[in-house]
Image (cartoon, helix red, strand yellow):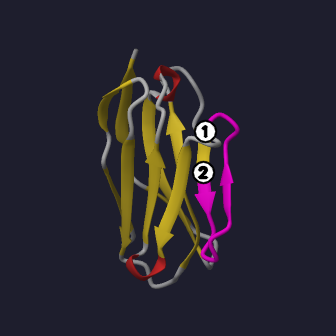
Amino acid sequence: QVQLVESGGGLVQAGGSLRLSCAASGSRFRFSDMGWYRQAPGKQRELVAVITSGGSTNYADSVKGRFTISRDNAKNAVYVQMNSLKPEDTAVYYCNALNEVGYRFWGQGTQVTVSS
């Protein structure tokens, strides 16, 4: 059974930084895309950033220049370094992984709260 476990969320002041980590386990197949989504109260879940197994990245316009996604293929892990955080970044952040046979998996979510 595939499990994605996130860590690193918390409360930070505006302008601060956080680093989220996600470790995947239990997969028979390698992961192609891994990434982060977020969902704020009353809003739809949205893409934050995604990284392919080859290292290509894509970011939401709202986080470009502030967030950096990376991954460690050997550890089946994905990270996002979040700098210059804003109150509007407050959300539950979800790790996401797509394996090479097309199944998508989600973590349980970690809360990020940015105070003004």
Question: Disc 1 residue type?
Answer: Val
The reply to whether residue 108 is visible in this rendering is no
Disc number for residue 110: none
Q: Nearer the viewer, residue 38 or 17?
A: 17
Question: Disc 2 residue type?
Answer: Ala
Residue 14 in the image: x percent, y percent?
A: 41, 23
Q: What is the number of callouts on the image? A: 2
| Tags 2 and 1 touching, CB below 8 Å | yes
Disc number for residue 63: 1
Q: Nearer the viewer, residue 46 or 64?
A: 64
Q: Is residue 70 left or right of residue 25?
A: right
Picture layout, residue 25 above or below residue 92? below
Q: Secondary structure at mark 2?
A: strand
- Residue at 48%, 33% in the rendered image: 84
- Residue at 43%, 78% in the rendered image: 27
Disc number for residue 49: 2
Image quarter for residue 113?
A: top left
Q: Secondary structure at mark 1?
A: loop
Say which quadrant the N terminus sits in.
bottom left
Q: Range of the magenta residues? A: 50-63
- Residue at 46%, 21% in the rendered image: 87
Q: Earlier in the sequence, mark 2 or mark 1?
A: 2
